[in-house]
Image (cartoon, rainbow, N blue to C red):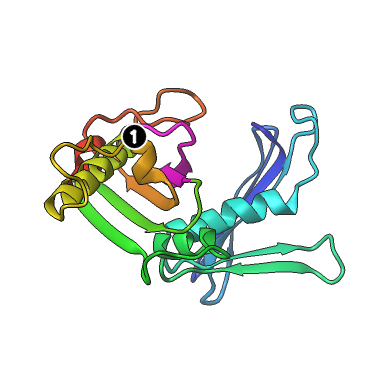
Amino acid sequence: ALSDWLEAEVRDGHTKHYMRFERGVTTVKMRDTPCESETGTTIRFHADPEIFETTIYEYDVLEKRLREQAFLNAGVRIVLRDLRTDPVTEDDLCYEGGIISYVEYLNAGRTALTPDVIYMKGQKGDSIAEVAMQYNDGYNATVVSFANNMATIDGGTHEEGFRAALLRSVNKYARAKGFLKDADPNLTQSDVLEGLCAIISVKLTDAQFESQTKAKLGNSEIRPLVDGI
């Protein structure tokens, strides 16, 4: 409904299935033609200028979003080409390391305080949680979270679980090793976040968000899953 026009083509190795829609109305019903061995799906569309203020696509915005998806889905290759430029602008996005590579990408140009990115993963039922983190010598914290590949810019239960577990673990370690004496107060959240770069990614079947923009995850069962790993 948001497209001026949209056409979809699915190839299953034997048949090419094609449909076209214009402003939500089917203008070409399912049309099948033979094809030899080719498989895949192609969707072409143009945003409706009567709905959107501009229909000019910004390459940098698309590149950032697709690179994000390549990090979140390890091994998936996404190729972005801008045919409006001469020569054609192209980015080939594939990261076998997944969110580990994402942390390395965000930490580029900074001095890491550990040789490797710390990575952990856990699963309970249909829910999966991944965390990758590494400290650098900077002062700012970069904590980015996702739920079902959607950026949760306002955090949510997965971030709450991560922050609580990190603070508890660092304080426990500091006291066990004598860095904090009995009379010393516990470290604070700002203490343990300084210089941290972390990615939190959860995938679940029934994601519950606290707004239409899906900016904050509300599933209560995700907090103990992330906290536990």
Front position in the image: 49 or 148? 148
Horizontal relation, residue 10 to residue 91: left or right: left
Residue at the location (21% across, 51% down)? 179
Residue 148 lies within the magenta run: yes
Location of the N terminus (image quadrant) = top right
Q: Residue 204 placed where, x, y %?
A: 30, 42
Furthest-right residue in this view: 86
Report crowding for label 1: few under 14, some 14 to 19, many 20 or more residues within 10 A (C-alpha).
some
Horizontal relation, residue 49 to residue 24: left or right: right
Task: Tell me: residue 72, above or below residue 13.
Answer: above
Front position in the image: 165 or 33? 165
Residue at the location (79% across, 27% down)? 50
Q: Which residues are magenta?
A: 141-157
Task: Look at the numbered disc 1 and give the secondary structure of its residue.
Answer: loop
Task: Tell me: residue 29, above or below residue 218.
Answer: below
Q: Amino acid at mark 1?
A: Ala
Q: Residue 53 placed where, x, y %?
A: 79, 30
- On the image, which quarter does residue 185 sit in? top left
Residue 145 lies within the magenta run: yes
Horizontal relation, residue 158 to residue 34: left or right: left
User: In this orientation, does residue 18 appear?
Assistant: no
Furthest-top residue in this view: 211
Front position in the image: 98 or 39? 98
Task: Tell me: residue 149, above or below residue 210.
Answer: below
According to the image, label 1 marks what residue?
Answer: 207
Q: Residue 15 placed where, x, y %?
A: 53, 65
Front position in the image: 27 or 154? 154
Q: Residue 168 placed where, x, y %?
A: 21, 41
User: In this orientation, does residue 105 appear?
Assistant: yes
